[in-house]
Image (cartoon, rainbow, N blue to C red):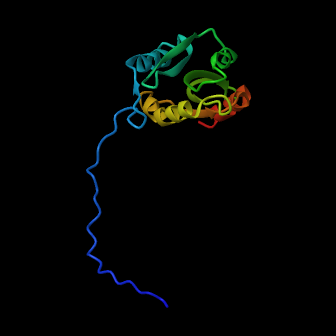
Amino acid sequence: KKRECLVALAPAAPPYCPPPRTLQAGMASGCTVNDECSEAYNEIKMKKDKRYVIYKIKDFKQVVIDCVGASTETYQDFCAKLPDDEPRYALVDIDYTTDDGRPQSKLCFFYWSPDDKSSVKSRMVYASTKDALKKKLPGVMKAIQANDRSDLNEEDVHKEMKKI
């Protein structure tokens, strides 16, 4: 025999919508962005005395500067500074030539996240903090995510920069 169950349904309450709130930098991960990160960005942008700035998250709490490359350093020098087993962010002044032969120099944001060697927690914290750092670096026209060394191929980066 089939049993029927009758339940009186109460009218549905309207869904609760919390008031909108503004997220502070890094709120999603709990990480903040140190002011020195913005200062280094301004220096690389205005003074052109640095080739790159590499950022890291210290103690899963704050984005800080990991290392800085002088303007005499190359793209290969930058790539060599990225650790094989930990994510990093970087701001790199990329020199390239446009299709019509003009030399150009533009800032590019890199998100380095070596999938096979870094911890899941580390990758998650870096992924959720990335936008907070990018907001502190206004005017950066290109962002590249690299998950292994082949993603850092200089020719491919130049092709991406030409699309700007």
Image quadrant assignment for residue 137: top left
On-image quarter of the C terminus = top right
Can you tell which quarter of the image residue 83 is in? top right
Q: Residue at x 43, y 32 (%)?
A: 132
The residue at the point 53 percent across, 33 percent down is 121
- Residue that protrudes farthest toward the front in the picture: 1
Q: Tag count in the figure?
A: 0
- Counting from the top left corner in percent of width and height, residue 11 is at 26, 75
Q: Residue at x 66, y 18 (%)?
A: 75
Pick the front one: 84 or 95: 84
- Picture coordinates of residue 118 (x, y %)? 62, 28
Q: Position of residue 85 (x, y in %)?
A: 64, 24
> Which residue lies most toward the bottom here?
1
Q: Is residue 88 left or right of residue 47?
A: right
Q: Which of the pair 3/90 is nearer the observer? A: 3
Viewer-side residue, 159 vs 143: 143
Residue appearing at x 52%, y 15% in the figure? 66
Looking at the image, is 146 positioned above or below residue 68? Answer: below
| Nearer the observer, 28 or 81 | 28
Relative to 9, residue 100 above or below: above
Give the image location of residue 34, x and y in percent.
Answer: 40, 20
43 w.r.t. 10: above or below: above
Going by the image, does 64 lie left or right of 22? right
Residue 11 in sight in this render: yes
Q: Is residue 99 visible?
A: no
